[in-house]
Image (cartoon, rainbow, N blue to C red):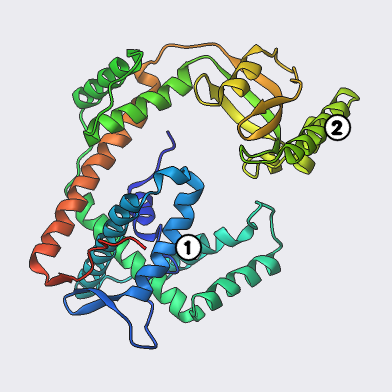
Amino acid sequence: MRRISLIKTIALMALAIFVFKLDTIAKTVDTVLATVNGDAIYLSEFDKNWGGYLDQQKKLLPPGQMTPQWEQDNKKLLLNEMVEQHLLLQEAKKKEVKVPKKDLEEGIRQVKERFKFDEQGRPLSPSEADDLFKKELAKEDLTQKQFEDRIEDQLRVIMLTNEVIRSKVKPPSDDTINALFHKVQARMSETKPAPTSDPQQTDIDAMAQYFRMKTDESVRVRHILIKADPGATLQERTTALKKAEDIHRKLVNGADFEELAKKYSEDPGSAQKGGDLGFIVRGQMVKSFQQAAFSLPVGGTSSVVQSEFGYHIIKVQEKRAPSKLRLEDVKDDLKEYLFRSAAREQYNAFVAGLRKKAVVDVRADFAKPS
């Protein structure tokens, strides 16, 4: 697991949705969804946040999962999160939290980093990136000063929560780390783990899955994908197959796999990396892809492989034999998980305390999903 400092954890929590979308000023009469100590949360503000969240989830979730009930539940969660952000910002201002200039400059830089690539992952020149950033400001009706003020507000929240949490969260003991290790190890040994709604057990399941990927037999693969969706017509599928076969012939004749992946692959997540998908384990990919990948020798390239996503050409770069999970290899990961879990508990308690003292009026229940 990638190590993330506490300050970055809180930063991600605070900035994930609210980078551009916080505190939009209504220029016309706007519906008030909630008030927090008299400060209004407007429908226009919420809609912008919801739109950004929805765009993210569409890339991660299958359409069938985004039901009207899913929409209703997640809108409630988002509005509650916005209420929390207002509470935290009010508390930070009340305590006169000051953001050092260097921290503000770094926060602005981190946000601008998002604009160094286009939607296809292609690197942009500094002038192109600056133009894209300015277009986003204009789209959100923000001046440069307003944007910087919003970043400063979020950094105030980060500094406040970091200060509160740092004073109350202690590093986990070795006994606690060992106990978690044995729970994860036991879960990994289960062939078909029973589903659970317990949040801690869900975390343990996620760690077990992650460590399986690190210890099970795995192969590092590249692929070239020519898309053909399940709903594609026969003619569309035939055209896609012919294109994939033409690419395969180029490879047989000595063409470079990475270059062809960059030029032809329709998988935006891997194309610019020469088709590199990293290491995969059994059960991670669709069946036809998995069978081809694990049957090839190192350096081997498959023929055209069909899946529900279209047509793949697969190349195996490296293979790893299965290994045993050892505490010394994952101790830092487990320690960080326990520390972050304790930090989250303290954060929730802090916010609950602020809410208990506040006057919060939530007027929207989203009973009728749009």
Instruction: Name, please, the residue furthest toward the bottom.
Output: 28
Q: Position of residue 356 (x, y in %)?
A: 9, 63
User: Which of 21/165 is in front?
Assistant: 21
Q: Which residue is mark 2?
A: 246
Q: Residue at x 45, y 50 (%)?
A: 57
In the rendered view of the protein, which quadrant contains the C terminus?
bottom left
Q: CA distance from mark 2 to mark 1?
A: 48 Å
Circle 1 Cα neighbour tier, 10 Å, few/some/many (<14 / 14–19 / ≥20)? few
Instruction: Name, please, the residue furthest toward the right.
Output: 253
Q: Residue at x 57, y 25 (%)?
A: 279
| Element assignment for label 2 | helix
Q: Which residue is mark 1?
A: 106
Q: Position of residue 251 (x, y in %)?
A: 84, 27
Q: Position of residue 348 (x, y in %)?
A: 19, 52
Q: Residue at x 69, y 14 (%)?
A: 296
* Residue 287 in view here: yes
The quadrant where residue 38 appears: bottom left
Q: Amino acid at mark 1?
A: Glu
In the rendered view of the protein, which quadrant contains the N terminus?
top left
Circle 2 Cα neighbour tier, 10 Å, few/some/many (<14 / 14–19 / ≥20)? few
